[in-house]
Amino acid sequence: MGIPMPGHPVGAAEVDGVRADAEALDELVQQHDIVFLLTDTRESRWLPTLLAAARRKLAVTAALGFDTFLVMRHGLPPPAEEAAALGAGGLPAGYEQAAPAEAAAPPPPPPP
């Protein structure tokens, strides 16, 4: 299955194959409740993540680096009635979002 990155050119001879691969991937996403993205690059995870969000499916990414790893849950968007009840940024109205004080303030100067 080959899915090019957005903005990358697709030759005329490849258009039908890319379209068939994208449709097959969309069918797989629709047929399952959760999508696990265990591919080797973030570039290969863009379309499955987008399709999962469009189909309101949960997507989980697991990525390995040379000395790191990442596991990320891509959540479902709230239904329309819940979204209307939430304030900006998906937080309840009146909820104040702020960084921890020690992270926002510079450290105190050393004693003389």
Image (cartoon, grey):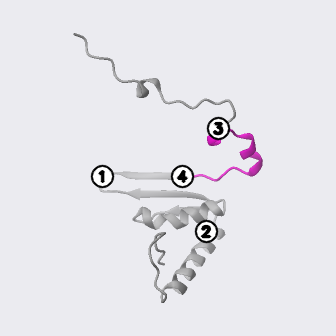
Q: Earlier in the sequence, mark 2 or mark 1?
A: 2
Q: Residue 37 location, x and y as percent?
A: 49, 63
- Return the x and y of residue 36 as percentages of the image width and height: 53, 62
Q: Nearer the viewer, mark 3 or mark 4?
A: 3
On the image, the x and y values in percent for residue 58 come to 60, 57
Q: Is residue 27 magenta?
A: no
Identify the residue under disc 4: 73
Gap between marks 3 and 2, in whole Å? 28 Å
Which tag is nearer the camera, tag 1 or tag 3?
Answer: 3
- Give SS at disc 1: loop
Q: Is residue 19 above or below residue 66?
A: below
Residue type highlighted by circle 3: Leu
* Spatial separation of the CA atoms under disc 4 and disc 1: 21 Å
Q: Quadrant of the C terminus?
A: top left
Question: Furthest residue to the bottom?
Answer: 13
How far apart in space, not on screen, are marks 4 and 2 (Cα)?
A: 16 Å
Q: Which residue is mark 2?
A: 29
Provide the residue span drawn in magenta.
74-91
User: Seen from this angle, which residue lies furthest right?
Assistant: 81
Q: Earlier in the sequence, mark 4 or mark 1?
A: 1
| Kind of residue at disc 4 | Arg
Residue topped by disc 3: 91
Q: Residue at x 68, y 29 (%)?
A: 94
Mark 4 or mark 3, which is nearer the start of the sequence?
4
Using the image, tell me which numbered label, if any, was put on residue 67: 1
Which residue is located at x 46 percent, y 74 percent? 4
